């Protein structure tokens, strides 16, 4: 159940627009921040707030790249698998990440730190291969750069260091 202050906040935002459904994606992001992902309860709460049917909200929640219907790690790594990245080393990057984190695409590490998700072009083709880590772009990747990136994150999250 949403905390009263978050619910009130969302109701205040929604009251500023003509049609509550205009804000449904913002509402989903705010609710996702609270739960960590969009639970069934979250879908129903967003639907109620926006005056929509839960199925309509479900359609949106499963459509967008940055809305998660299942639990994800603290760091979500979106790996671009579109054409320019394919040409410039996507496979090496994907295989390296999967092997380093010991998970497949679509999975989360057992410590809950990383999730790997494929994504379409993120507009960083001139520095491909590229990934997003919690929506921040990293390009011109090599296994060495990935090592640095992953190790830095692990250092910043000592509770997760193996
Ligand atoms: S194809 Fe990967 S960033 Fe454009």
Image: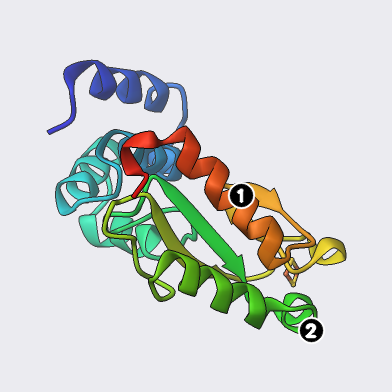
Quarter of image, ligand 1: bottom right
Residue that carries the numbered disc 1 in the rendered image: 149
Residue 134 falls left or right of residue 141: left
Q: CA distance from mark 2 to mark 1?
A: 22 Å
**Crowd rating for badge 2 (residues with CA inside 10 Å; few <14, some 14–19, many 20+):** few
Q: Tell me if residue 131 comes above or below residue 33 in the rendering.
A: below
Q: Position of residue 112 (x, y in %)?
A: 30, 51
Residue at the extreme right: 126
Disc 2 is placed on an element classified as helix
Q: Residue at x 56, y 42 (%)?
A: 152
Name the front one of labels 2 and 1.
1
Residue 105 seen from this side: yes
Residues 68 and 44: in front is 68
Q: Residue at x 27, y 42 (%)?
A: 46
Residue at the extreme front: 162
Cβ of mark 1 under 8 Å from ligand 1: the answer is no
Cβ of mark 2 under 8 Å from ligand 1: the answer is no
Quadrant of res 101? bottom left
**Crowd rating for badge 1 (residues with CA inside 10 Å; few <14, some 14–19, many 20+):** few
Q: Position of residue 53 (x, y in %)?
A: 23, 54
Residues 147 and 52: in front is 147
Disc 1 is placed on an element classified as helix
Q: Position of residue 63 (x, y in %)?
A: 44, 65
Residue that carries the numbered disc 2 in the rendered image: 87
Sequence-earlier tag: 2 or 1? 2
Q: Residue at x 30, y 48 (%)?
A: 37
Residues 50 and 90: in front is 90
Q: Tell me if residue 122 comes above or below residue 41 in the rendering.
A: below
Q: Position of residue 55 (x, y in %)?
A: 24, 62
Q: Residue at x 12, y 33 (%)?
A: 1
């Amino acid at each position: 159940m949403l905390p009263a202050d978050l619910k009130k906040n969302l109701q205040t935002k929604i009251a500023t627009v003509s049609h509550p459904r205009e804000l449904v994606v913002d509402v989903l992001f705010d609710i996702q921040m609270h739960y960590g992902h969009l639970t069934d309860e979250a879908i129903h709460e967003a639907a109620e707030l926006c005056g929509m049917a839960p199925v309509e909200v479900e359609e949106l929640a499963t459509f967008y790249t940055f809305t998660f219907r299942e639990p994800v790690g603290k760091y979500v790594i979106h790996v671009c698998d579109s054409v320019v990245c394919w040409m410039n080393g996507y496979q090496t990057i994907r295989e390296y990440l999967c092997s380093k984190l010991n998970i497949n695409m679509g999975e989360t590490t057992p410590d809950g730190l990383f999730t790997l998700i494929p994504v379409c072009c993120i507009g960083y083709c001139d520095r491909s291969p590229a990934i997003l880590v919690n929506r921040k772009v990293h390009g011109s990747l090599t296994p060495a750069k990935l090592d640095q990136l992953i190790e830095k994150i692990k250092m910043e999250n000592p509770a997760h260091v193996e």
